[in-house]
Amino acid sequence: MALFSRRGRSDSTDEAAASAAEPVAPAADIDDLATEDVPQVGISVSTFGADPAGASPVVAARPPATAPAPREIVPGLVDNALLQAALSALSAQPQNTEIMNVMRQALQGQLFLRAQGDVQALIAAGQQINLAIASLEGKRFLLAFSGGAALQASVDSEGGAATSVIGQPAVEVLRNAVSGAYDGVYLDHATAGARVILPKELIARAVEESEPTFEIKTLLSGPRDESTAARVADALSRLPVWVAGNSDAEGRMGLAEARTPDGQRRMEVFSHPLEVVALGRGDSPLPVQPEQLGRALASEPGLTGVVVDPGGPWIELDRDALAGVMALAES
């Protein structure tokens, strides 16, 4: 927790203005996240979109494999760089895929909240903590921030009100927003061109349709070491994931693969259905249990492994690393 304060002003408010511009209101269709209609998927591995004549596959450029290095614009506050990048990429009229990209990156790392006054002193005195909100068109939105610059912009927009900053895991902030008396979360409200409102319905759907621990997403977005690949592989042997499905002209379902010019074929695997939707390819996220993933890999020896969350941060795992997953096909 950090404390922002400016001299020369003794009053502060728990209700923040929405800055000079109207918020960027998402037009996202939350039904894009729906998976109830495909609770069980019979996996037959085939690549859709491939040239049947065997032409060289088109290799799409991927974002960086790892998250940006941690940075502190404000000392003591580590920015959520992945979320900042997603917000900065918003167009003037954000498309559904852009909103989904922000939503998926808001599920990892930390978010920061503002509170009136000195929170530590309030807690010590047993007094109520008032979080900063924005009231817009009769609705109440919790203000949340991706890092120090956005927080400072918010404080400056109010003339430097004394403010405490509370950092929490992003998922906890989102869950509390859903369970609280809020209509959504307003991200970086004072940062023109890089701010957006996530409505309560979208947040609730995104949280509900994840596996509860967000283990894989946390591993991919956090610092990595020599154990990361093994830890992700272990998670794949225990946790549900999603694959990207689509149909060819004859109505046959195929699953997305990543192919390289040297002939490597990796099944695309996703930690959350939003990871599929945010790619904007029109694929459907299909839920897959570990046993199903193991059977798919074991039945197709031509697959050299998987790539997890190709929208980034991502990781590639070879077949040897996935032995524990494939062993599930024999159980």
Image (cartoon, rainbow, N blue to C red):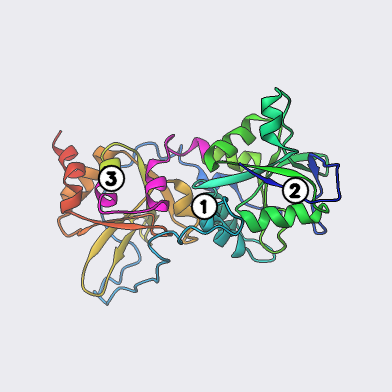
Q: Residue furthest front?
A: 7
Q: In which quadrant of the rendered view does residue 173 lie?
A: top right
Helix, strand, or loop for circle 2?
loop
In this view of the protein, which residue sits in the foreground, 8 or 291? 8
The residue lying at 45 percent from left, 61 percent from top is 69
Which residue is at 38% across, 41% downward? 215
Q: Which one is nearer the viewer's eye here, 269 or 55?
A: 269
- Residue located beneath label 1 in the image: 105
Pointer 1 with pointer 3, Cβ within 8 A: no
Q: Which residues are magenta?
A: 207-233
Q: Which residue is mark 2?
A: 5
Alpha carbon separation for disc pair 1 and 3: 21 Å
Element type where label 1 sits in the image: helix
Question: Could you tell me residue 260's position as x and y percent?
Answer: 27, 70
Q: Badge 3: few (under 14), some or many (20 or more) residues near its Cα, within 10 Å?
A: some
View extreme (bottom): residue: 55
In the rendered image, which quarter is residue 201 located in?
top right
In the visual, does 194 lie left or right of 72?
right
Is 188 included in the stretch rendered in magenta? no
Q: Amino acid at mark 1?
A: Gln
Work out whether mark 1 precedes mark 3 in sequence or the reverse, and give the earlier one.
Answer: 1
In three-dimensional space, the C-alpha distance between marks 3 and 2, rounded to whole angstroms, equals 42 Å
The x and y percentages for residue 75 are 59, 54
Q: Identify the residue under disc 3.
A: 231
Tag on residue 139? Answer: none
From the viewer's perspective, is 140 left or right of 235? Answer: right
Q: Is residue 115 above or below residue 252?
A: above
Q: Residues within 10 Å of mark 1 (few under 14, many from 20)?
A: many
Identify the image quadrant of the C terminus.
top left
Q: x%, y% of residue 272? A: 43, 46
Query: From the viewer's perspective, is the residue at label 2 or at label 1 nearer?
Result: 2
**Residue under the point 54% across and 53% down:** 80
